[in-house]
Amino acid sequence: MPKLVKDNALADCGRAFLAKDATLDSITRSNDVVPLSLWLEHLDQCKARGIDAVWVDSDELTEPLAPSLEELSLVAIHFPTFMDGRGFSTGRILRERLGFTGEIRAFGNVIQDQMHYLLRCGFNAFALREGTDLESALISLQDFTEHYQAAVVQDKPLFLRRSA
């Protein structure tokens, strides 16, 4: 079973991701992760089948998920290339604007060097590229101990934390 880094530990993936063009008939297990379009078009049927996980492409907006976010335990954000930074903003929007408290997972072309910054944007799970040493990736989350800027995980910039 594929592994991932989740909540500062190694974990089993435990879920199957359905293709972008999946249909209701493609759902075979309640722990499948369905594409955003399928969730939005067939919300009631997905919920009836026990689906609680959606994946979003980097060019898709998550605001349409707002009314049903409480039904979801996982929103996975696809990074088609490591140079596509739109997913960082998507994670931050989910946490800060939409108030999502479940798992936000980065998957696709995600590299170890991005993990720390993804964490600061609200991600708490990372399915890294094939061949990545997950133990090393887990350790790399501790590379930086202080940050100048505010983030999802620390809402005050360094100068405000130091003056307190």
Image (tube, helix red, strand yellow):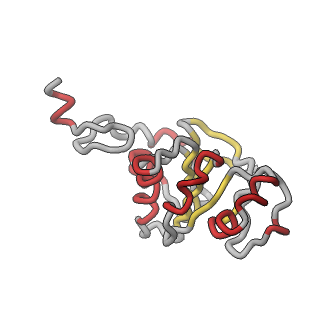
> In the picture provided, is 50 more to the left or to the right than 81?
right
Q: Where residue 40 sits in the image (x, y, percent)?
A: 64, 65
Picture quadrant of residue 26: bottom right
Residue 37 x/y as whole percent: 64, 70
Residue visible at 34% across and 39% down? 144
Point 78% across, 50% down: residue: 50
150 with respect to 53 (left or right): left
Picture residue at 49% right of the left edge, 72% below the top: 59
Q: Nearer the viewer, residue 146 or 69?
A: 69
Give the image location of residue 136, x and y in percent.
52, 44
Q: Nearer the viewer, residue 158 or 64?
A: 64
Q: Residue at x 48, y 38 (%)?
A: 139
Q: From the viewer's perspective, is 143 left or right of 50?
A: left
**In the orientation shown, which residue stands out farthest toward the bottom?**
21
Left or right: residue 87 compared with residue 143:
right
Tell me if I can see residue 113 in this picture.
no
Observer able to see residue 14: yes
Above-or-below relation of 32 to 96: below
